[in-house]
Amino acid sequence: MVAELATRPQNIETLQNAGVMSLLRPLLLDVVPTIQQTAALALGRLANYNDDLAEAVVKGDILPQLVYSLAEQNRFYKKAAAFVLRAVGKHSPQLAQAIVDCGALDTLVICLEDFDPGVKEAAAWALGYIARHNTELSQAVVDAGAIPLLVLCIQEPEIALKRIAASALSDISKHSPELAQTVVDAGAIAHLAQMILNPDAKLKRQVLSALSQIAKHSVDLAEMVVEAEIFPVVLTCLKDKDEYVKKNACTLIREIAKHTPELSQLIVNAGGVAAVIDCIGLCKGNIRLPGIMLLGYVAAHSENLAMAVIISKGVPQLSICLSEEPEDHIKAAAAWALGQLGRHTPEHARAVAVTNTLPVLLSLYMSPESSEDLQVKSKKAIKNILQKCTYLPALEPFLYDAPPNILKHVVGQFSKVLPHDSKARRLFVTSGGLKKVQEIKAEPGSLLQEYINSINNCYPEEIVRYYSPGYSDTLLQRVDSYQPLTN
């Protein structure tokens, strides 16, 4: 009855107030096996609900009893006991440490060799939940000998067991290069790579996640993942129906690309960048984030790689993300990626500028509603692009809208281009640009004043005077004081 009631959140508080914890504990030792199992199940459901109840399991001295039973009892009880350990361990590193301290790891690792797949699954789940908190707990799981057995579990026929074992390997690998290396040394990569095409979406999510957590730490580990021939196979996951398969596939490609230009080039050659750009176009929200970051990482490495992203139509796609995504952190990632694309050469900057991205970046930087991170990334991207941009039609609106700290970069670009381009000089006068420059108030001797002087030196003195503020008043005064010649 209690186990049944504990499945519904609205009953939990009542059960807690009724003191069921202390009532369930003696039932773990009942002579009737089904009572033992159901008592453990009830405790697991309660502990799963929140950390107060999990704490009560620890304080009630229930863990040693469970660990003892894990080793001795039948498979049904083992599953229930492992469920309680997982439910307690998931909440915090302190609760997970309590499980380690009562000697549960060795017994859980023994359960990974059980003949019953359900027992293996329950044990793998508990070990993964303990390992996910931090490096020390993960190391304790490794020291207990879990990894080789988890690698065997991913080769078992049961899909549920494969999923949980892959998830546990992912949780162990994520903390440090050393932990990821122990997973690699146990031969995990080859088995994980073979499952990328498994039809089960939840398994694919875990497999891609585990490979990402291994690849992220170092060039060597990323190269080992690539050597398992995951390309071009992994690109099929970018078209998967499951959103999280797409997201985890993008994450895996990103974690490989970020390390070196060579690894990024390999992804470009495999068609990975184009496939990720298509993927970003077909999804929304957080699913886009790793793909956006991947484009930024690839573009950051070199001119050629940035150009590969531009040729694959990455810029329009990033501009769409910048404009239509409601979340600031996604906009910030898109702004950062666009800055990486535009910062190499005038050609790169122009490719970004022609998509009308600069005004959007400026409005995000200026908006009081933007998060601090979004403002910083937008400003940096504007600066990166402007410092290379010689495409004047994109720069001109900035003369009117930009704040002083950005205006100096804009005027700086005009001062570089106008001396060498007579057509641009003429256009700059007719569009009102020269007049606007005369209205800018710059500190004498400042860099901005130098830029303005360079621009003015491109024109005859009387033209500059004509467009200077107050010049029309001076002319009118001359009209007033002019004495016409009379015969």
Image (cartoon, rainbow, N blue to C red):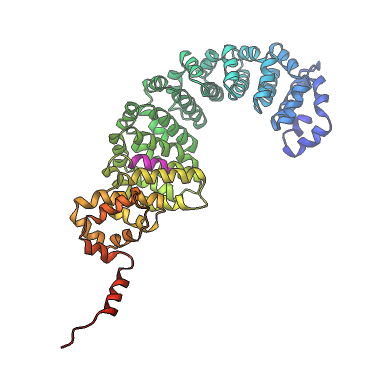
**Quadrant including the N terminus:** top right
Q: Residue at x 28, y 65 (%)?
A: 467
Say whether residue 360 is visible. no
Nearer to us in this view, 116 or 166? 166
Is residue 340 located in the magenta-colored stretch of the structure? yes
Say whether residue 11 is visible. yes
**As displayed, is residue 481 above or below residue 237?**
below
Nearer to us in this view, 101 or 77? 101
Is residue 250 located in the magenta-colored stretch of the structure? no
Quarter location, residue 145 = top right
Quarter location, residue 107 = top right
| Percent coordinates x, y for residue 204 in the rendering | 48, 29
Quarter location, residue 298 = top left
**Quadrant including the C terminus:** bottom left
State the predominant SS element of the stretch in magenta: helix
Q: Which residue appears farthest toward the left when viewing the image? A: 487
**As displayed, is residue 49 above or below residue 189?**
below
Residue span colored magenta: 334-342
| Percent coordinates x, y for residue 408 in the rendering | 35, 50
Q: Residue at x 75, y 32 (%)?
A: 4
**How many numbered circles are shown?**
0
| Percent coordinates x, y for residue 164 in the rendering | 56, 24
| Percent coordinates x, y for residue 125 in the rendering | 60, 23
- Taking the image as shown, residue 4 lies to the left or right of residue 466, namely right
